[in-house]
Amino acid sequence: MVAVSCLLNPIYLFTMDYKEGAYKVKDLSLAEAGRLRIEWAESRMPVLMSLKEKYSATKPFSGYKIAGCLHVTKETAVLCETLAACGAEVSWSGCNPLSTNDEVAAALAKSGIEIYAWHGMNTEEFYWCIDRTIDKTPHLTLDDGADLIFTVHHRFPEKANTIIGGSEETTTGVHRLRAMAGDGKLLYPIYAVNDAETKWDFDNVYGTGQSTLDGILRASSVLIAGKNFVVAGYGHCGRGVAMRAKGMGANVIVTEIKPTAALKATLEGFQVMPMDEAAALGDIFVTATGMKNVIRGRHFAKMKDGAIVSNTGHYDVELNLQELAELSNDTRVIRPNNREYVLETGQRVYVLADGRLVNLAAAEGHPSEVMDMSFANQFMAHLSLVEAHKNNQKLEPTVIDLPETLDQEIAGIKLETMGFSIDTLTDEQVVYATDYSAGT
């Protein structure tokens, strides 16, 4: 058995630039490199840039404070600066201890964004950063995982009286917020950005699929072709991972608890079985479920020597690393974001990014092109909240879906920027679509 407290909550020692009330980042001298990353993302995010151009003149967010808790990537930086250019006073923290790009964080701090984020923070530091974004009592909260929303509700409920609304970007977060609303505990309205089609059917599928494989390759550099690749969960994220792994030549195995999801995976050509069976067959494992203890001690014990295990769900609870440590005699970091566990039986298991989101901790997250649409939804959700507030429209404290017309508008803009055009219905076809008297 190896001790795990130091493995799961490592202490990172470094000098942090910090000016009270302004920012706390790892190294401000990284700003120039971060600015280049941001400019690259801007060149790949035409929808969000068009919103920035459209609304920076009228500045609809003037007088409003937006607190954000979202992975500090180059794409997030484009969203931050778009909100600020449109009048918002922005304060920001990272939504995962290992997902912040320190170069981007430095560039945001240098540009005047109030930001508290660095790669490798421990749990106490993580929540300290969230608290700082709440200090000035925001009017709006923008979330990925709902940690900011939950912090307001659990520790600063009095500040909710000033908050007019917020948004949530993850499947896990939306599920929990709907449960909170159902119990009558949600204190202000939240737009379910995750449930917009231009988010979940693009960001979750194509973004997660590509970036997860990117993270696995950066952390392991193994050949994917010919490997038994186990994907736990066949929701939108798991489907994207399975699709990309198959495209790289892997033999994909899917584990599921939902019959319809398992049936979809079967009909799309994948093997389906319980994790207890897949554990002995897999060469590479990825969890994408949002549920805790998906891979636990008894599964690790069955794995092949050299098995690679990773997680692409939002929280680091899908892999039970405590139970893995109890089965192990030794552990070491064998390469960046790749920890080797030597089990008492002699086989080696390699855990990537200590069970954190492998696509962000070991890579750069989703490509800019898909985040373009997700962040356009975030922008429009907050614009809707502000417009409702200015019109004295009181929204109920519940989870709200973005209108389908907005989905189509954003998708249409994206198609135009890609050089594609589509058909439109004629007047005759519009009438026919709703003509219930028409028969054979």
Image (tube, helix red, strand yellow):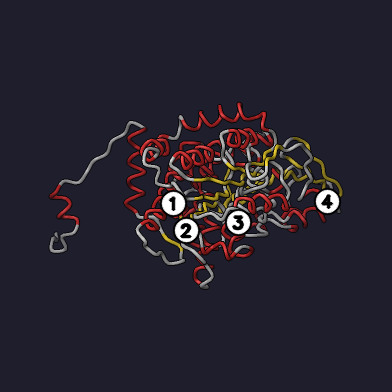
* Label placed on residue 382: 1
Circle nearer the viewer, 3 or 4 = 3
Residue 110 showing in the rendered view: yes
Residue 250 showing in the rendered view: no
- Residue 57 percent coordinates (x, y): 37, 38
Q: Is 94 drawn above or below residue 223 in the view shown? A: below
Residue at (60% x, 56% y) in the render:
147
Q: Secondary structure at mark 1?
A: helix
Q: Secondary structure at mark 4?
A: strand
Cα distance, mark 2 to mark 4? Answer: 47 Å
Residue at (20% x, 46% y) in the render:
425
**Marks 2 and 1 close (CB-CB < 8 Å):** yes
Instruction: Write down the quadrant of residue 101 in the picture.
Output: top right
Residue position for label 3: 147
Mark earlier in primary sequence (2, 3): 3
* Label placed on residue 165: 2
**Marks 3 and 4 close (CB-CB < 8 Å):** no
- Residue closest to the eye, 311 or 31: 31
Instruction: Write down the quadrant of residue 99 in the picture.
Output: top right
Residue position for label 4: 328
Q: Is 26 drawn above or below residue 297 in the view shown? A: above
**Marks 2 and 4 close (CB-CB < 8 Å):** no
Cα distance, mark 4 to mark 1? Answer: 48 Å
- Residue closest to the eye, 151 or 158: 158
Q: Residue flagged by tag 4: what amino acid is it?
A: Ser
- Residue 427 percent coordinates (x, y): 14, 48
